[in-house]
Amino acid sequence: MQCRSQFIPVGGLRLHYLDYGPEDGPVALCWHGMLQTGRSHAPLARHLAGRGWRVLAFDLPGHGGSDWSGQPGRDYALEAFAEFGRRAVAALGLERFSLIGTSLGGHVAMAMAAADPASRVDALVLNDVPMALPRAIADRVPMLVGQQSRFAFLDEADRHYRRVFAAGGTYDAALWPAYLESLVRPHEAGGYVVHHDPALRQQIEVNGHQNDRTADYDRLRLPTLLIHAGRSSVVDAAALASMRARGPRPRVLELPDLGHPPCWSTPGLAEAVAAFLDQSVSDTDGA
């Protein structure tokens, strides 16, 4: 299934997104994790599109095909990312939609859903997303983001990213080349370099206090599916128990053998998410 590569001007930046499925289908907006791109959602997006959904998978500012900000202290912050999302929804004229987020993208989705005054969000899917980013993880992010790894050849980048994402499972082999190409860009001196803005480290260094979204989570009162990786580095047993008992009281889908973040190619995962979204929209329409 083909997707349409699109750009939209939002808040002074140009955001890139992939548009899957029929334009008149129910809409799902996808937000990726730190240092990923919208292509990470391709296995899920293609499955949903095959069931009649329109899926918009965005590159967050500073990632992939979206613009890098000249004011990273302002634009590379969780609340700014959520505001970019809200402005994109308004610019696209979307009346109702569901939200899907992985890791950092799950915080974006939570913030958008919690602040939506018209209750336009039908359902929320959180892919291994904590209420608050653990300090041990937050302390490592600036170093990882600031590294501008260079690769002499594309297959060197291939090996690097397979190692980076190995904990979450194996990405669909047919879709992997396009995803890899969204993660790197040619370097003027030859070879390839990672395709994200190193100033994204300010999302933690300057604006790290915004990565505690507990208040947003507690405000949520909508159908929510929480995907939990059994070997997660961000959602431990205590955090999972707390999330089960508060806020939206989510349905939990356990993936016991995977780490953070689970890959959307995981067998049965796209089908489970699709069934949840279909039911949530059906319940909303019937209310």
Image (cartoon, helix red, strand yellow):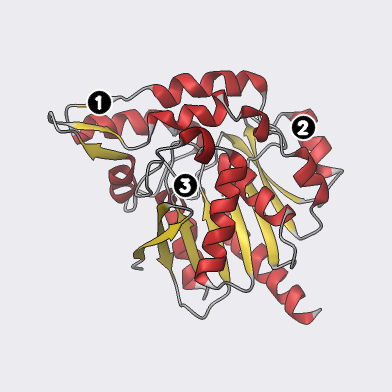
76 shown above or below 173: above
Q: Dot 3 lies on which element?
A: loop
Q: Nearer the viewer, residue 176 or 4?
A: 4
Question: Is any part of residue 270 visible from this angle?
Answer: no
Which numbered disc covers residue 239?
2
285 shown above or below 193: below
Q: Quadrant of residue 196?
A: top left
**Mark 1 or mark 3, which is nearer the start of the sequence?**
3
Query: Which quadrant of the figure contains the C terminus?
Result: bottom right
The amino acid type, in three-letter code, at marker 3 is: Leu
Which numbered mark, 3 or 2, is in the foreground of this view? 3
Q: Dot 1 lies on which element?
A: strand
The answer to whether 213 appears left or right of 172 in the picture is right
Residue drawn at x 62%, y 31% as measured from the top left: 232
| Rendering coords of residue 185 (x, y %) | 25, 39
Residue drawn at x 51%, y 28% as measured from the top left: 202
| Rendering coords of residue 62 (x, y %) | 41, 41
Q: Which residue lies under the disc numbered 1?
A: 150
Q: Which residue lies under the disc numbered 3?
A: 60
Q: Nearer the viewer, residue 230 or 26?
A: 26
Query: Which quadrant of the figure contains the N terminus?
Result: bottom left
The answer to whether 48 appears left or right of 5 in the picture is right
